Image (tube, rainbow, N blue to C red):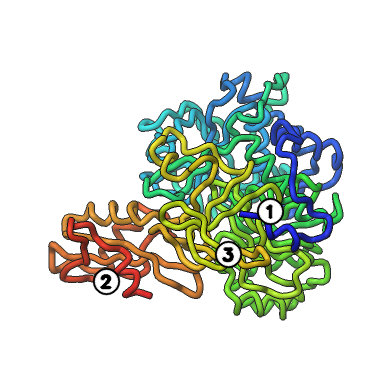
Amino acid sequence: MEKIWLKNYQEGVPAEINPDAYGSLVEIFEEACKKYGDKPSFVNMGETLSFKELQEKSRNVAAFFQSELGLKKGDRVAIMMPNLLQYPVTLFGILQAGLTVVNVNPLYTARELEEQLIDCGSIAIVVLANFAHVVQQVQKKTSLKHIIVTEVGDLFLWSKSILINWVVKTIKKMVPDWHIPGFISFKNVIKKGSQYSFQKPLIQSEDLAFLQYTGGTTSSRVKGVMLTHRNMVANVEQATTWLVPIVTLGKEIIITALPLYHIFSLTANCLTFMRIGALNVLITNPRDMSTFIKELKRYPFTAITGVNTLFNALLNQPDFKKLDFSHLIISLGGGMAVQRAVAERWKKVTGTVLLEAYGLTETSPAVCINPFNLTDYNGSIGLPVSSTEVSIRDNNGQELPIGEAGELWIRGPQVTKGYWNKSKETEESLTEGWVHSGDIATIDKEGYVRIVDRKKDMILVSGFNVNPNEVEDIIALMPEVKEVAVVGYPNGTYGECVKAFIVKKDPLLTSEAVIAHCRKQLTGYKVPKEIEFRNELPKTAVGKILRRALREKVD
């Protein structure tokens, strides 16, 4: 398809970027630390790390991994924590040591964690103490050799660290009992790492930077998307060129409420805004709205990213409307559709346009972003970013003309090389460099792309993929269940919610029992919000359950 969208690029945004401008993410990181040295890089709960301090502490982590643990280039290291200062320190330590980052949702159940760790073969994990009991349950079933445990206040000043950690454990009782023989404290990693010399490895552009897990565009349950340093460098460059016309290098302040283990926040906030010398304000628990808004009040923030549910929740807080938005220039929504009603309220309250972006884990993630000079919400996911091709295809892979709906295919330097140890799924999702998004879209004559439906069965809850196969497998373990099918249904708060249709084997089975069973095995956002019992489920002639028929009933 001709790149008709280029004519609507904001002035200063190039048609192409150089994905080889940097050999690795580490080069970008080192340049930012050198350029912005004493400027603040990340702040959390009032504690700030300058770029220089971030580099020093992350180098200590890298040296510890090399010298104390003996980790080799390419080894996988998992991070299991919310937004804390320890996250970027660990992240950049792993990358500098030439290792591969495996992000883990800290709310995972033992079953979910075990499945991911077995698949990726992580040798080490850095986990917040609040979730160490989950790691304890799976340690012997995985390839983990080294477990590093951190506490919330580990990077705070000494007195504050002692107080915060005591409050979290003793007063708030947020740390379940755990016992892991031979665990390593994060504080010791920093301390001992400072005593070792760091041996800088040769990192090449095609080396894996991340194994980022996703429900993805195929039906397989657990899939690690292989994202190389070149993939990530390309996407950071694509995002940066979009920002440059409106930002001031070294001056921006971005609110980071979405978890950094999520690909959107990882690339957009952590990496891209680090690249331009911005301060990332890390929000550890955005559900605690009163504390969240107090943090917003402390900083003259210029940018905020989120998903529709986050923006809606903020707008529903009276104190949010009292904040000073005079510095705000970027409000960017991703992960799921931004609703028009929310966008219109956002502009009325903040005076800025809530722009929508679109991406996939498989694309590092940015594919399309709306230009930052738009004056109103337009209902589209924006224009394809620099060096990116999009194409609307029919079921035979043939390109469709402008205006017609079909599956959105994407090609560019940010597209993954495939799924970790899954050649079949890679073949299903990638064709000659094009990734099949699984989303039905249209593109208009101005080059703006709109998502109109989902081709796959994946359910999108608050920006997170939920694979219906996984939920069905868990429910099917109940002896009282004869058959089950899971679909997503529209929800004004979450975008989509999970609904399970069940044929009972035991007439005494209740919805409450099903939900209680799911809560033991699944992260909260995967647990069905609704259960509907049926005498039978719709099937094809060969006996396959028709999820689409059930979804149409729900819609």
Nearest the camera: 343 or 526? 343
Q: CA distance from mark 1 to mark 2?
A: 42 Å
Residue 59 in percent (x, y) is at 71, 29
Dot 3 alpha-carbon crowd within 10 angstroms: few under 14, some 14 to 19, many 20 or more: some
Residue 492 in percent (x, y) is at 50, 75
Secondary structure of the residue carrying numbered label 1: loop
Residue 402 marker: 3
Judged left or right of residue 340, residue 537 is left
Secondary structure of the residue carrying numbered label 3: loop
Discs 2/3, front: 3
Residue 507 in view: yes
Contact? badges 1 and 3 (CB < 8 Å): no
Secondary structure of the residue carrying numbered label 2: strand
Residue 203 in percent (x, y) is at 67, 25
Q: Label 2, on which residue?
A: 532
Q: CA distance from mark 1 to mark 3?
A: 18 Å
Q: Amino acid at mark 3?
A: Ile
Q: Amino acid at mark 2?
A: Glu
Q: Label 1, on which residue?
A: 385
Judged left or right of residue 51, residue 466 is left
Residue 300 in percent (x, y) is at 81, 64
Q: CA distance from mark 2 to mark 3?
A: 40 Å
Q: Residue at x 71, y 65 (%)?
A: 331
Contact? badges 2 and 3 (CB < 8 Å): no
- 277 vs 93: above or below: below
Q: Earlier in the sequence, mark 2 or mark 3?
A: 3
Q: Residue at x 71, y 50 (%)?
A: 386
Nearest the camera: 417 or 405? 405
Residue 451 marker: none
* Image quarter (top left, top right, bottom left or bottom right) of the C terminus: bottom left
